[in-house]
Amino acid sequence: MREILSGALLVIGTTFMFLAAVGLVRQPDIYLRMSATSKATSLGVGSVLLAAAIYFGDFAITARAMAAIVFIMICTPVAAHMIGRAAYFTGTPLWEGTLIDELRGQYDPRTHELESVSFPELDTHLPDIEMRKFTLPVGSDLEGLTLAEIDLRRKYDITLLAIRRGAEVISNPGGDIAILAGDELVIMGHPERLSGVRARIRRIRKAAVPANPDG
């Protein structure tokens, strides 16, 4: 009975490891390959070690096998996460068929910390406060100015939470940050104040009128 059970676990373990090898070869990007190999190899190696523990029936071997299984189950997902995180930070592309990238724009590239600009409970805790996103248009007279020069907090009594610039998110930006055309400003404040900020952001810089040499 012991041989049958250990043999079945060996077959299961080798099958999972074979599937991991297939996934490593067939998956189209590092993230999918990592997902396939980390899960399948953990189950495969765990099954093989469990088969060895059952076959030998020795306490010392069983203890070592159980310790190795626990170590693998803890370390494999951590290692996979760190590899995927490093790949994402260095710009390793996702498979072209990927439809959703939920991490896009959520990492601060300076600190490598996950930032969130979503506040699902804002209406519950601050019923008179709203959060809106405004995109700075090309030609806005705010373009190129720093936040200290614009001074939105003092003039409009609002809070600028973050600036989304392409894939980059600048959280809690300082006064030395200049805003550029296309930047998405995540602003929190009273609705009336936010309406004033929107009008200010959309104000287009007047084109310079050339001087008339004839007077």
Image (cartoon, rainbow, N blue to C red):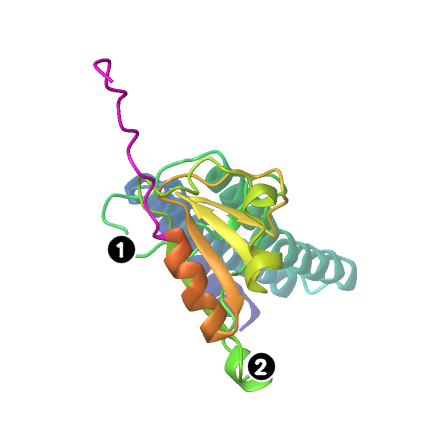
Q: Amino acid at mark 2?
A: Leu
Q: Secondary structure at mark 2?
A: loop
Mark 1 is on which residue type? Leu
Q: Which residues are magenta?
A: 202-215
Name which quarter of the figure residue 125 lies in.
bottom right
Report, in whole angstroms, how far the alpha carbon at label 2 lies from the one at label 1: 34 Å
Eye-nearest disc, 2 or 1: 2
Residue 164 image point, x, y percent? 45, 49
Helix, strand or loop at mark 1: loop
Which class describes the residues within 10 Å of circle 1: few (<14), some (14-19), or many (20+)?
Answer: few
Residue 48, image x and y in percent?
54, 56
Circle nearer the N terminus (2, 1): 1
Query: Are there few (<14), some (14-19), or many (20+) residues within 10 Å of tag 2?
Result: few
Q: Which residue is mark 1?
A: 99
Q: Main secondary structure of the magenta part?
A: loop
Report if residue 214 lies within the magenta region: yes
